[in-house]
Image: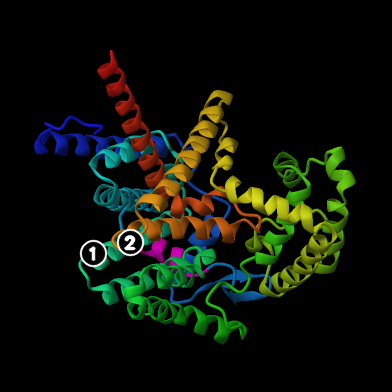
Amino acid sequence: MLLPKTISSSVERILIFSLFALNALAFVFIAAAVPVWTTNDTPRYLDLADNFANGVFGLMTSHGFEIEGVRSFGYPFFILVCRILPGDIEFNVVIVQGILYLISVFFVWKLVKRNFGTEVSYVFLILLLFYPFIAYQSCVLSPETICLFLLSLAAVILDFSLRKDFPRAGFAAAGLLLALSMYFRSNLFPLPFFLTLIFLFTFKKHRKAVLFLPVTAILTMLPATIYNYHNFNVITPTPVYGGAQTSLWMAVWHARLSTDEMLKYRRNEITPTIASSGMPEQLAEINRKIGVSEDFFPINMGYYENNATREWVQREFGKAAVENIRETPAVYLKSSLINIFRMWFSAHLSNQGFSDLLRLYLLFAGFFVFLSGLIGLLLSIKNFVHPAAPFVVTAIAIIVFHSITLCWSHTEARYTIPARLFLLAFAAYAIAEFLKQMRKCFKSLQTKI
């Protein structure tokens, strides 16, 4: 036991309330400290929300008004809903996202308490106070927090429904929520189907009920699929010009160059290593074919002027990426394997003008939670994975999904934010188990003395 056995329920409630209040204050502090709440994508999302209010989903381009093919309509619709509130739209979005973040924390805390025990739930809330990355992402206009909420709610529903033995409703609701997350982050599109495969092998007595998950997911994705087929003649629920090809091209070059060199090149700083790599020449050649400036870096598909250009961009960068992989497959594979771990560290926070000491702390916090989470995950596989622990299975599957699907492309650490609370849950479990073992050793020494 990490807490005294005689602790009263009223004291426990006060402690829990205090920890939640501290986490809420931490969010407010981070929101106030963040210099800007916007990202490179924010103007596009805001413009799409404005046009959404007028009954159309698209933007003005050099070819006139064009239907949107870069972003899905989940986050613009969320911004549109936030416009109902009085005041500044950016402030409203951050406040609503902060509320959803704290609700997500409550959901996962309940799951941790139910599955790992009260002591671990305390460690979870304390650990979250020293792990600012999730709260930080809730303070910027970006869709990761909405996905965090949807995945946390899906995990709660699955855990509750399987424990109360009405699995069909639980799997159906989870399929709906998981598919909705795709409307905010398109990389989550395969998640419902990945979880279906995991659940079919794990929850054998519920195999028929598990099939409700992919069915409701497909039905939920149907409007986006119809939208893309009607407007672009492409059968897919994800944005047609989402930029998977440019992301792959950048990932291949990231395998050959360091992160610092990639960042310098995006700032038009050409180092000797970059100059000799061949990357500037290839980029210039592709850009000449597309018809844009030779040093135009493909960091965001929204920066290209129209859909016709974006189609060229995806085609040319896709071809170049495949050719580069064929040239150095081992280098690309090695980098992708490293990305499995690298994407769980929010390195982009270091670009916010922080001191070296604070950067060092952020690096330590990320490394400590990742290592503890990995240990806790392995311990939970040993101790908990069976039909009576659906949360453990779901949390592990979500973490594994993010690791094995994002590592192949050039992705930012924020893409793993929807899974970070689950990682934190396993980290709390590992820390609590370590403290228990230390207490046992201490008692053993006292007995011998």
Segment tinted magenta in the rendering: 72-81
Question: Residue 446's spot in the image, x, y percent?
Answer: 27, 17
Q: Mark 1 points at which residue?
A: 163
Q: Residue at image x 32%, y 37%?
A: 123
Question: In front: 110, or 371?
Answer: 371
Residue 45: within the magenta?
no
Task: Name the disc covering residue 313, or none.
Answer: none
Task: Name the disc covering residue 390, or none.
Answer: 2
Q: Residue at image x 45%, y 48%?
A: 378
Q: In this view, does 327 lie to the left or right of 139?
A: right
Question: In front: 106, or 3?
Answer: 3
Name the kind of residue labelled 1 in the image: Arg
Seen from this angle, which residue lies furthest front? Answer: 448
Q: Residue at image x 65%, y 58%?
A: 409
Question: In front: 323, or 351?
Answer: 323
Name the kind of residue labelled 2 in the image: Pro
Mark 2 element type:
helix
Mark 1 element type:
helix
Question: Residue 171's spot in the image, x, y percent?
Answer: 33, 73
